[in-house]
Amino acid sequence: MNSKHWLMKVLSMSLIVLLAACSSPAGNSSQAPAGTSEGTKKYAIIGRSTGNPYVEKELEGFKNAIQELGGEAILKAPEQATAEGQIQMIEELISQQVAVIAVASNDQDALQPALKKAMERGIKVLSLDSAVNPQSRMVHINQADPERIGRVQVQAIAQMIGGQGEIAVLSATSTAQNQNLWIEWMKKELEQPQYKEIKLVKVAYGDDLRDKSVAETEALLKTYPDLKGIIAPTTVGIAAAGKVLSDKGLQGKVQLTGLGLPSEMAEYIDNGVCQWMYLWNPVDVGYLAGYAADALVKGTLSGKPGEKFSAGRLGEKEVVADGVGSQIMLGDPFKFDQGNIAEWKAVY
């Protein structure tokens, strides 16, 4: 091959390479770092189930935080409050190479293999509201001190029923870590001598489904005709119990307290079915999780007790020890009654 032909061949091959390079758009996803799309980090959150107003507010708060921080929020929740549905979503998010997975678990231990796989792939993992075990996450976002949440609900129902009578608990799922922990503290509070005339007759599970929670409430009333009070530490459960007690005209006969959304419980507080209840702002729970997720990605937070970081409008937050793990506490449970429910029902 003479030098002229050789030079023409080299120039032709160079032109082909150049054209091929120009045909590939800049920022092609195959070249982007894990957890990014055109440079925007993806932050995913998995709620307990769809159709749950509390969960929707948590997801809303997470999205608000991520948008403030310039990221992309991916909001997910299974139709039913099951671990299987959440595991499938975790696997999907791993394949999408998200930067963060935040999850409010339906089962403390069942998510561990999937979440450990995510962390091995470089994805930051945290839980919120209902924790996964410490081996499955870097840090947990807690609404309030579990002991205070459990004890204050017993103190409330005891006052409402005059310190004597049968009571029941209407919980979410039997595997919900937060519910079970609160119920443990309820039982410890009931061991105090001032509650010797109060008897916990049943812990029922409505699985965070309105219809099932209604059915469980009706079953409690039928099975225990002398029932004096119901504690429902779940927003779905307390609203369902409120409806049943209202429909049956049991105001003042069967007392109700627990954890509820002001917007859903206002009518039951106004009509006397529920004298007062407690909760925190689920929007703030999700918002705090969003800022913690961003700090984990940036490396300004690792989840070790003693660390502090800025949580946007919530101010500075600190990581504290949580058994063998760590957690970030949102604040104390807040009391809602006839004196403030009108103001708060318009908020959430």
Image (cartoon, rainbow, N blue to C red):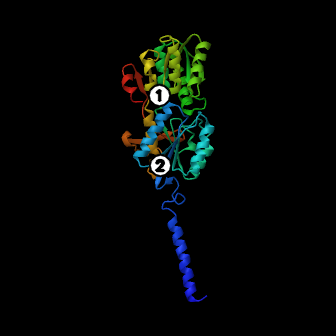
- Residue 226 in the image, given as x and y percentages of width and height: 57, 10
Image vertical order of residue 31 relative to residue 232, above or below: below
- Front disc: 1 or 2: 2
Which residue matches tag 2? 296
Q: Which residue is mark 1?
A: 148
SS at circle 1: helix
* 45 over 4 or under it: above or below: above
Along the viewing direction, whichever of 139 and 185 lies nearer the viewer: 139
In depth, the one of 97 and 14 nearer the eye is: 14
Mark identifier at residue 313: none
Residue 279 pos. (x, y %):
45, 28
**Which one is nearer the viewer's eye here, 306 or 60?**
60
Cα–Cα gap, marks 1 and 2: 28 Å
In what element is the residue under mark 2? helix
**Could you tell whether 131 is left or right of 63 in the image?**
right
- Looking at the rendered structure, the kind of residue marked 2 is Leu
Residue drawn 56% across and 42% down?
Answer: 134
Question: Which quadrant holds residue 330?
Answer: top left
Viewer-nearest residue: 124 or 74: 74
Determine whether label 1 and label 2 are within 8 Å by CB. Answer: no
Q: Position of residue 273 (x, y in %)?
A: 47, 15
**Image quarter (top left, top right, bottom left or bottom right) of the N terminus:** bottom right
Q: Amino acid at mark 1?
A: Arg
Label 2 crowd bin: few (<14), some (14–19), many (20+), radius 10 Å: many
In the picture, which quadrant includes the C terminus? Answer: top left
x and y percent of residue 101 in the render?
Answer: 53, 45
Q: How many C-alpha atoms fall within 10 Å of the one at disc 1: few (<14), some, or many (≥20)?
A: some
Q: Is residue 183 visible?
A: yes
